[in-house]
Image: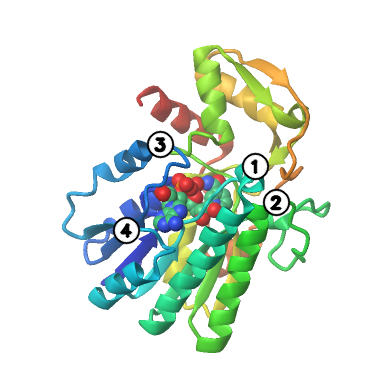
Amino acid sequence: MIKNQNIVVTGGAGFIGSHLCEALLREKTNTVICLDNFNDFYDPVIKRNNISSFQKHDQFNLYSLDILHKEDLEQIFEKENIHTIFHLAARAGVRPSIQSPKLYAQVNIEGTINLLECAKEYNVEKFILASTSSIYGNKKKVPFSETDPVDHPVSPYATTKKAAELMCYNYHHLYQIPMACIRFFTVYGPRQRPEMAIHMFTKHILEGTPIPVFNHGKCERDYTYIDDIIQGVLKVSEFDFSFDIVNLGESKTITTLDLIKRIEKACGKKAKLELIKAQPGDVEKTYADITRAKKVYGYDPQYPIEKGLHMFVEWYKHL
Ligand SMILES: NC(=O)c1ccc[n+]([C@@H]2O[C@H](COP(=O)([O-])OP(=O)(O)OC[C@H]3O[C@@H](n4cnc5c(N)ncnc54)[C@H](O)[C@@H]3O)[C@@H](O)[C@H]2O)c1
């Protein structure tokens, strides 16, 4: 665990960001500076609740701001002596990016540049970018490795994340800022975004309403439990990297229909299915090669899907 640091977590009130803030706060010598604009991509009340339990911490500072406002960022970097930036703030999700490509480009590329500029101007020691498995597009070769070419993203979301990774490389090359781009493979667990599959499927099953299942349930995903993602992100952040790209997943892939069967089991209830055609922008398969994360960073995922789904459903039932 990193110690004695002032750490910025952008998007710190979101699903993954709030878990990261919580983990970083466990080390009492850290100060965590959470930046979030509480936008309405999903209900901002959920984001307020995500961080409510640790907002009373002396070591936790919350700033409600938009990363597109560079002057607001500068005021914070001027005031706090920041060692590390975990940059998670983004417009996430493949399908909405097809409706709003400009917004995705603005937040995910221009927003990233604003943070990179701050990293340069205020001598930040490490920069860690939340990237995504979507970058791999519809690759046939599995599992997906960090050295695979990623020149054919199939959604604006994936394209903006690829651009953000390239920008990170630019800033590393030009200003020698240590950079790690971590590609998350579909993350789930408590606080998962409400529009994501596992959250939505659980809601439909427990309420007895039909689940719209795209691509007739044939898509395959590598689902990663949130605690494994946080473990991996923290392990990478402790390391003395120069520039690196790292996959974090479970390296197990299952179809949507298989996923639904497992959620049915965790809920103790059958699902009603409405099988429909594939959605544009969705990739057919994701499957992480995690050799690098394991070998270089000591990543050691602990949550097979049954265990993780059980934890998720328990959390959901107590919402
Ligand atoms: N959840 C996944 O499965 C997954 C997979 C791959 C990559 N990622 C990436 O991980 C990161 C976190 O994802 P998440 O699932 O927690 O999403 P999330 O939407 O819950 O979190 C993102 C947070 O960023 C904030 N934000 C967005 N735009 C902002 C802006 N302009 N200024 C300030 N704050 C802003 C949002 O309010 C939100 O709280 C994102 O970068 C996402 O692309 C997530």
Q: Tell me the distance, in whole angstroms, between the alpha carbons under discs 2 and 3.
A: 24 Å
**Residue 43 tag number:** 3
- Give the mark toward the camera: 4 or 2: 2
CA distance separating discs 1 and 4: 27 Å
Marker disc for residue 27 = none
Which of pointers 2 and 3 lies earlier in the amino acid sequence?
3
Residue 132 quadrant: bottom right
Q: Give, as a three-letter code, the residue at label 4.
A: Cys
Which mark is on residue 95?
1
Give the residue displayed 65% in from the left and 49% down from the top: 251
Q: Which residue is mark 2?
A: 155
Type of residue at label 2? Ser
Circles 2, 1 touching at the beta carbon (< 8 Å)? yes
**In the rendered image, the vertical position of residue 273 relative to residue 97, given as above or below:** above
Q: Residue at x 58, y 74 (%)?
A: 167
Q: Amino acid at mark 3?
A: Asp
Q: Earlier in the sequence, mark 1 or mark 4?
A: 4
Residue at image point 30% right, 46% down = 51
Classify 10 Å Cα crowding around label 3: few (below 14), some (14-19), many (20 and above): few
**Residue tagged 4:** 34
Pointer 2 and pointer 3: residues touching (CB < 8 Å)?
Answer: no
Kindly report the distance in space between the C-alpha atoms of the residues bearing marks 4 and 2. Answer: 29 Å
Nearer the observer, 21 or 293: 21
Secondary-structure class at tag 2: loop
Q: Earlier in the sequence, mark 3 or mark 1?
A: 3
Looking at marks 2 and 1 on the same chain, the residue that comes earlier in the sequence is marked by 1
In the depicted structure, whether residue 4 falls above or below residue 291: below
